[in-house]
Amino acid sequence: MVSEKAAHETMLMMERVVDDEVGVAPRAQVPGYRVAGKTGTAQRVGENGGYDGSFSLSFGGFAPADDPRFTVYVVIHAPAVDGGGGSVGGPAFSKIMARALSHYGVPPTGSKPSRTPVEW
């Protein structure tokens, strides 16, 4: 079981993933909402059981970060462009999440995003 404090601190760190200044996935932001997320990159296995040289990239996150309503997970298998999960999956996440929040009438976040340090 994860304590409430540990869960909250993890959310604050995950918010920094989409931060303009220090994040690796600023294109996953949803205007007006606090977003928390995690990028992923995995080597893909080919028919012979070894790595085939391609990758799967992902971005998963939730919003509003301070009062979560939705979780979205985007995976792109063998993308045709270079980049990581944030730069490739982040924009798709942003569009899908923005649509879900709008469709279900989730009001914009009223608080500021985390400024938790990213280095200690």
Image: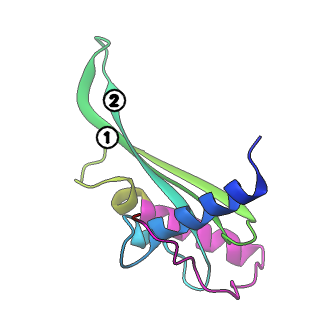
Residue 63: quarter of image: bottom right
Which three-letter amino acid code belongs to the residue tagged 2? Arg
Residue 43: quarter of image: top left
**Is 104 covered by the magenta stretch?**
yes
Q: Position of residue 80 (x, y in %)?
A: 25, 49
Residue at the spot 68% in from the left edge and 68% down from the top edge: 100
Which of pointers 1 and 2 indicates the residue nearer the eye?
A: 2
Where 85 falls versus 105 (above or below)?
above
Residue at the spot 54% in from the left edge and 60% down from the top edge: 37
Mark 2 lies on residue? 44
Q: Judge from the rendering whether residue 102 lies leftward or rightward of residue 120; answer left or right.
A: right
Question: Which one is in front, 118 or 77?
Answer: 118
Q: Position of residue 16 (x, y in %)?
A: 48, 69
Mark 1 lies on residue? 78
Residue at the spot 67% in from the left edge and 86% down from the top edge: 111
Where 6 falls versus 31 (above or below)?
above
Residues under labels 1 and 2: Cα distance?
8 Å
